Image (spheres, grey):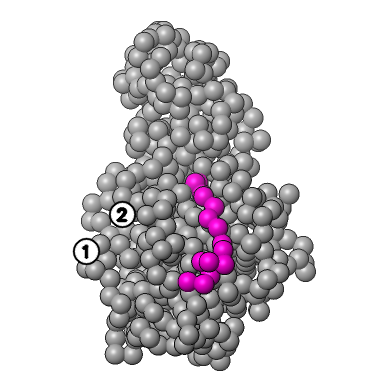
Amino acid sequence: MTDLREITVRDTDLEALKEAEGRITVFVTPEGKMSQGARRLNRLTKGAIARAVESAAFEKVKVSGLMTLAWPAGLKAEAVDIVKLARKPTIEDARKAGAGLAKAGRTGMLLLAEGTARAEDVALGLALRSYAFTDHKSDKGDAFGDVTVMVSKPDEVRPRLETARAVAEGVVFTRDLVSEPANVLTTTEFAARLEALRDLGLEVEVIEEDRMHELGMGAYLSVSQGSESPAKLVVMRWKGGAEGDAPLALVGKGVVFDTGGISLKPAAGMEEMTMDMGGAGVVAGVMKALALRKAKANVTGLVGIVENMPDGRASRPGDIVKSMKGDTIEIINTDGEGRLVLADVLWYAQEHENPAAMVDLATLTGACIIALGHENAAYFSTDDAFGADFAKAAKTEGEGVWPLPFGAGYAKQIETPLADIKNTGGRPAGTITAAEFLKVFVKDEMPWIHIDIAGVARVSSETTLAPKGATGWGVMALNRLVADRYES
């Protein structure tokens, strides 16, 4: 598993600048105003900082961008990075600045942030963009050096940095899970990694297949029956709120590998189906972040872990299975397996955890990528206020979301004469009909959000805060939702 880059906060010590090694970062406003520390560094470099800031080249640097002075005279440091950033930057700009610093170099860094607010967000961006999944590489590259952040009031910044670090730990946990190959992250290994979260204070329960049979989870079990790996339903409970308060339930699809089953996927690109457990990965990351930061809220994470394989015992197109709720489902396409898993997990959550509200996440439909590409996740909500709170949290964290509608016409597409419903509604509006399918398993009075993260869980090019690959999308948004809606 990936360790976060070490970042510490200390009081500003301008006398230490001359002897500091590695890289030194100073923050200069877009107007060219320098802090006291930047002015001291300017004197040590015989005016090099001021000349750079006054240059035409620095004028062209975008906000959050940087200019580097290599091997500056008067210092032991190998480089000074001059970052263009307002003294009170936005969250987005601060994190983007940190990400830029992560890409600037791997050596140790001293960030002279005594005149800049949101130092914790700069650090968060730096930590997240320093991520690299190297567990299976022989050459893991040079280790990242430690980062020291100098601020004027370390006692105020340190708790905020610790909270930011907890969130970053959750994001990195998700990225690691999504990045693992299926021969490593089996259903059993996935459950074991979640059981290890007990060390952070989470209650973790693993429900095995024999108990699922007793519960009547026929939809869920129809997906696992073609695999040698047993299905695992893992329930993680964080009880940081008032005793007796109903929890928020987070539900994740955890298909560790999806061949499509008998409705076999094309071979090209199938290797990417290791990421089909992305929803469960996000739920796991959120639960880890909440535990690390000791969130004052009650939150239960439920993840349905399974593998979808073709086999003589596998479900066939045309099979009819019975859900835990009692509704029968005609399986039209065995590649519509994630919704079968979620149907029973959503119902289990309502029957056994009695949540105040539910959010589910799933890499559910390729249609979502066609609709929204890799910029936004689609979301649906049965409660306008709940949906608005989530959208606000996602926007604050810079994680794009876009609402899609429910509708009677879409629900009609999953009707069938042979059973209560069928598991696909055809190609038109595939993301919406999948949501309509899940809605059947959500009680009328239950506030619920469904998030399709097919396009954002793993991407083929780098983002601001992540290299190409697993993004950890959703951990920050849901952590923010918990903080704003359930802890305020």
Q: Please report the residue visible at 46 percent of the width from the left and 49 percent of the height from the top.
A: 376
**Mark 2 neighbour class, 10 Å CA radius: few under 14, some 14 to 19, many 20 or more:** some
Q: Is residue 402 part of the magenta span, yes or no?
A: yes
Q: Please report the residue visible at 41 percent of the width from the left and 39 percent of the height from the top.
A: 464
Q: Is residue 279 visible?
A: no
Q: Is residue 334 visible?
A: yes
Which residue does the numbered mark 2 point to in the structure image?
134
Query: Residue 111, percent across and down?
Result: 48, 29
The residues tagged by marks 2 and 1 sit, at their Cα atoms, a distance apart of 24 Å
Query: Residue 133, percent across and down?
Result: 34, 53
In-front residue for pair 50/455: 455
The disc placed on residue 268 is 1
The amino acid beneath tag 2 is: Thr
Vertical placement of 393 versus 404: above or below?
above
Secondary element under disc 2, as helix, strand or loop, is loop
The quadrant holding residue 150 is: top right
Q: Earlier in the sequence, mark 2 or mark 1?
A: 2
Range of magenta residues:
399-413
The amino acid beneath tag 1 is: Ala
In-front residue for pair 47/91: 91
